[in-house]
């Protein structure tokens, strides 16, 4: 394999970025019960709840989420609780109320609470340098980091610094030590940068000061006193809890793939205070009341009022993060998200607080209204929770049941079909947008860059982004009434792109495919037997590098990459594909992920595209870097289409712009460039491949080949389903 497989990259992401851990929690005293109540008795109109229920059901029907639960608690009484959609879509299991969800980053407020407790007890100060507790932070840069910096995400860390399998870390101290060895992005305290590394370091601080694992402190000092008996830091073999956990999906609207289910092994062997908690809506509401009640639960005080004030400070603006709560701005406090409006003195005044998690969980609390809303899903990549904020504001806060925004326009199928198609970006000669109809809206894709979902706006012909109404597209018509261009606002200046029309004088798809096959020598592959390519995979953004080896022939491929002792394997054989990594073990791929993985094989990428794609079309000829390039669009049967950049003179493939599904993350744009082609037995193989992902947390990945061998002898099981231990041979020595 001459470049990084999407499935292999997905394995890396799952293993080092997107992890969870669970454990059985001991029973504690009963916390707030939140008994059911008639909505009218709390002042909430039944009609408002009907509209909210209908909207969440729309989210399921429109495939914006797979399943979820919405709970509204007013005056400590439950006025609405309903489950929607699927607990496991493939198994046909419907979602149940009070399911146990992975709340991901909603773990952060709990470690923040633990830190506040230690401050209350004079065992810690906000301005304590971290190196006084964890000596390995005593470096030129990290020596300046204080507890306060970690609490409000101003320490200078990138999003994550984990660089090997979690099983190789004994505890959070090891993860904190790795963070301490990372080059900081900026001077501590100078700006905000959301970081799991900082929150995990807070957990290591709690463990160091208390002399016991942080999960024990959280269990004994927070979960037990609050009666949060359904909240678990560590799963282990707790089958009773596993039975209540929904299967986890990732992707985005209309494109969900299951990446974990409760019968799979727990992903994390240690408790990460950035993301590993599992909880229910009821239990997390109990936790919210601790902060709403100024640190008390019943007649027992767990936090001082000063700790609550510290935690809910408006420390750092979250800038362009979308907010649907009226005119409120979003800030980050000390491990809490705080929504604030202008106070009497002009400074931000907190109105509500909460947090969300990347698997699609949200919690909001309005202390002055004694109102809590919890919306939990298991759909990683959904924007539904943020989109729900404006509806909560309109119905529950403003009480505007007759607001015109509630009357959403439903576009006709004819309207959607009329605007479907391809539109050029006039500011970029190689960029175009693909507009595809979906249930009550549109999907707009730009290969290599973005995948966005739009819903119909009140204005005919206009569609707004599912979360951010400042992002929109509208379609303009000619005098004859035909749609001839798309006008759009994607955060920059207003632009207009013409609709694609066929260009004369271009070679046919068959001609360009034949040229590519001839240039790359794809027909030589049967003569060469099994080919082995070896080199280095450099995940530059994460500063991880390791050896990578691929074996392939005319229809099979096996790739293995190692980072320290972490091994990732992807096997493709015929129409089947498997991945094997420490996070999930061996999994057979299916659906969209299977298709895009199989399309990454050498004989497909540089072979007969017409045999493997549903459509192939030559779009444009342009001059770039002294060469004439043909843009060719290829569209698979299930996954998003891609743009192939073919050198018209040589026939070599120079670049691919595509959109890929990464389990646990979603759909990401990636631009892959092929460099340093060399002849190997009559085939042209790129010895350097650079993949630039549009998602900043992924960044740039470079694959450099060092050796290529042909006619390699392999064992019988080389291209079979990987063993659970990843022990299949990568080819015997000649």
Image: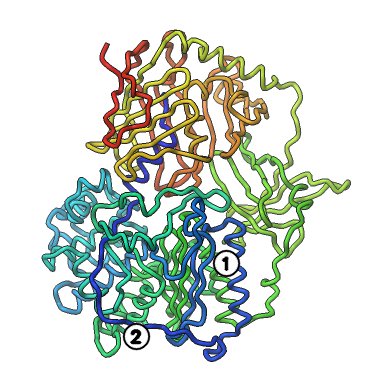
Horizontal arrangement in the rendering, residue 51 relative to residue 709 (left or right): right
State how far apart marks 1 and 2 are (Cα): 30 Å
Quarter in which the C terminus is drawn = top left
Lower sequence index among marks 1 and 2: 1
Q: Are marks 1 and 2 in contact (CB under 8 Å)?
A: no
Residue, disc 1:
56
Residue, disc 2:
293
| Residue 669 percent across, percent down from the top left | 51, 42
Horizontal arrangement in the rendering, residue 615 relative to residue 214 (left or right): right
| Residue 342 percent across, percent down from the top left | 48, 79
The residue under the point 53% across, 18% down is 652
The residue under the point 55% across, 46% down is 450
At mark 1, the secondary structure is helix
The one nearer the camera, 714 or 374, is 714
The residue under the point 42% across, 70% down is 98
The one nearer the camera, 539 or 93, is 93
Q: Say which quarter of the image contains residue 618.
A: top right
| Residue 714 percent across, percent down from the top left | 32, 17
The one nearer the camera, 506 or 658, is 658
């Amino acid at each position: 394999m001459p470049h990084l497989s999407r499935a292999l990259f997905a394995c890396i992401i799952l293993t080092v970025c997107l992890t969870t851990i669970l454990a059985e929690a001991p029973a504690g005293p009963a916390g707030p019960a939140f008994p059911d109540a008639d909505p009218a008795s709390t002042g909430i109109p039944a009609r408002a709840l009907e509209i909210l229920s209908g909207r969440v059901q729309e989210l399921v029907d429109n495939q914006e989420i797979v399943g979820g639960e919405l709970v509204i608690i007013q005056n400590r009484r439950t006025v609405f609780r309903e489950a929607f959609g699927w607990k496991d879509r493939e198994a046909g299991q419907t979602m149940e109320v009070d399911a146990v969800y992975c709340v991901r980053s909603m773990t952060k407020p709990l470690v923040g609470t633990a830190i506040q407790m230690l401050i209350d007890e004079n065992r810690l100060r906000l301005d304590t340098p971290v190196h006084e507790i964890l000596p390995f932070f005593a470096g030129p840069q990290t020596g300046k980091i204080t507890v306060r910096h970690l609490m409000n995400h101003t320490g200078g860390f990138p999003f994550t610094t984990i660089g090997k399998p979690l099983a190789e870390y004994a505890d959070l101290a090891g993860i904190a030590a790795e963070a301490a060895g990372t080059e900081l992005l900026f001077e501590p305290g100078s700006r905000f940068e959301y970081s799991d590394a900082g929150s995990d370091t807070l957990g290591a601080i709690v463990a160091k000061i208390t002399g016991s694992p942080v999960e024990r402190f959280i269990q004994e000092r927070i979960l037990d006193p609050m009666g949060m008996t359904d909240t678990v830091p560590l799963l282990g073999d707790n089958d009773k809890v596993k039975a209540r956990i929904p299967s986890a999906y990732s992707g985005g609207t209309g494109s969900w793939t299951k990446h974990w289910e409760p019968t799979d092994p727990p992903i994390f062997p240690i408790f990460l205070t950035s993301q590993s908690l599992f909880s229910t809506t009821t239990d997390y509401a109990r936790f919210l009341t601790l902060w709403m009640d100024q640190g008390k639960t019943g007649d027992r005080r767990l936090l001082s009022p000063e700790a609550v004030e510290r935690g809910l400070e408006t420390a750092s603006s979250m800038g362009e993060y979308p907010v649907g709560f009226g005119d409120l701005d979003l800030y980050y406090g000390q491990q809490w998200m705080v929504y604030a409006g202008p106070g009497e003195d002009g400074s931000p005044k907190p109105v509500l607080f909460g947090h969300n998690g990347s698997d699609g969980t949200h919690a909001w609390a309005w202390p002055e209204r004694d109102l809590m809303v919890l919306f939990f899903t298991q759909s990683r990549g959904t924007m539904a929770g943020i989109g729900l904020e404006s509806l909560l504001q309109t119905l529950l806060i403003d009480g505007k049941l007759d607001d015109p925004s509630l009357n959403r326009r439903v576009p006709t199928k004819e309207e959607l079909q009329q605007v479907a198609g391809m539109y050029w970006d006039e500011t970029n000669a190689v960029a175009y947008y693909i507009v595809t109809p979906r249930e009550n809206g549109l999907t707009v894709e730009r290969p290599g860059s973005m995948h966005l979902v739009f819903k119909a706006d009140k204005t005919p012909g206009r569609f707004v982004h599912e979360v951010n109404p400042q992002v929109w597209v509208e379609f303009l018509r000619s005098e004859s009434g035909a749609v001839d261009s798309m006008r759009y606002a994607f955060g920059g200046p207003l632009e207009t792109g013409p609709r694609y029309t066929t260009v004369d004088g271009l070679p046919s798809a068959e001609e360009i495919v034949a040229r590519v096959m001839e240039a790359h020598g794809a027909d030589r592959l049967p003569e060469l037997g099994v080919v082995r390519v070896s080199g280095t995979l450099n995940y530059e953004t994460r500063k991880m590098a390791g050896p990578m080896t691929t074996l392939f022939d005319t229809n099979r491929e096996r790739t293995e990459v190692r980072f320290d002792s972490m091994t990732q394997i992807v096997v493709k054989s015929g129409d089947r594909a498997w991945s094997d990594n420490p996070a999930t073990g061996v999994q057979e791929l299916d659906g969209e992920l299977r298709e895009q993985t199989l399309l990454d094989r050498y004989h497909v990428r540089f072979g007969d595209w017409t045999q493997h794609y549903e459509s192939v079309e030559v779009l444009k000829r342009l001059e770039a870097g002294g060469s004439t390039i043909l843009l060719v669009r290829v569209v698979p049967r299930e996954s998003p289409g891609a743009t192939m950049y073919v050198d018209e003179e040589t026939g070599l493939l120079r670049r691919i712009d595509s959109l890929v599904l990464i389990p646990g993350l979603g759909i990401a744009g990636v631009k892959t460039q092929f460099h340093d082609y060399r002849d190997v037995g009559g085939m042209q193989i790129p010895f350097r491949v650079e993949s630039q992902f549009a998602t900043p947390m992924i960044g740039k990945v470079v694959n450099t080949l060092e050796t290529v061998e042909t006619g390699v002898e392999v064992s019988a099981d080389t291209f079979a389903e990987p063993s659970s231990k990843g022990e299949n041979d990568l080819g015997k020595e000649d």
